[in-house]
Amino acid sequence: MTENEQLLTRVADKARNTRPWGWTSLPEPLDVAAVARAETALGFRLPPLLADLYLRIGDGGFGPEYGLLPLLDSPPAGEPAAVTQYLANRESARKDPDWPWPEGVLPISHWGCAMYACVDCHSPEATVLLFEPNADDVDNAWYVDAPSLTDWLRAWVDGTGWYEETNEELELAPWADFGIRTATAHAS
């Protein structure tokens, strides 16, 4: 069994046994056609591990805090689906260039207070970023939550994420590529 297969098994086990706030059950997994529709709407491919989460475990409803957002349809808690949220963030950035949203950075989980865990779908390791807009300064709103989606999922399964009570003192590093990834949008 590959490392990803082992991780997916661990995530599936935890997903079957825990419910994030607002979720009464684990949604069914998506089919390949639904993931293809999402990728068409987004204009880019999902990292393979992220696609596998939706294809093999469920359409959201598992993961840290409020859990993974559904890909295309709104969850029971009323939060927009990942694709809807991404497209809205990109549109908002066009209207307000002082708050650009990087292309290919897909919100996957809501933390509350307008904060999101996001996957950089253009990075080879699928870096997970924290968008924290409450600082009122876009240059201080992006942090590296985990170097990869693999690391982010392991932290959730192992209970070692920054959001755990025992790890509240962990400091997240600013996302150094934010300025580079938004230079064109920021300059316009």
Image (spheres, rainbow, N blue to C red):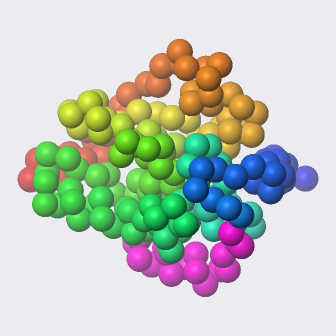
Residue drawn at x 62%, y 28% is 164
- Judged left or right of residue 74, residue 151 is right
Does residue 140 appear in the picture of this structure? yes
- Judged left or right of residue 164, residue 131 is left
Between residue 28 and residue 124, name the one nearer to us.
Answer: 28
Residue 23 at what x, y percent from top left?
63, 59
* 93 is higher (above) or lower (below) than 155: below
Between residue 58 and residue 19, name the one nearer to us.
Answer: 19
- Judged left or right of residue 69, residue 134 is left
Residue 184 at what x, y percent from top left?
18, 51
* 142 is higher (above) or lower (below) than 166: below
Residue 56 at what x, y percent from top left?
75, 67
Q: Is residue 34 magenta?
A: yes
Residue drawn at x 55%, y 35% is 146
* 95 is higher (above) or lower (below) than 19: below
Residue 136 at what x, y percent from top left?
21, 34
- Judged left or right of residue 97, residue 151 is right
Q: Which residues are magenta?
A: 27-44
Residue drawn at x 45%, y 54% is 107
* 169 is higher (above) or lower (below) than 18: above
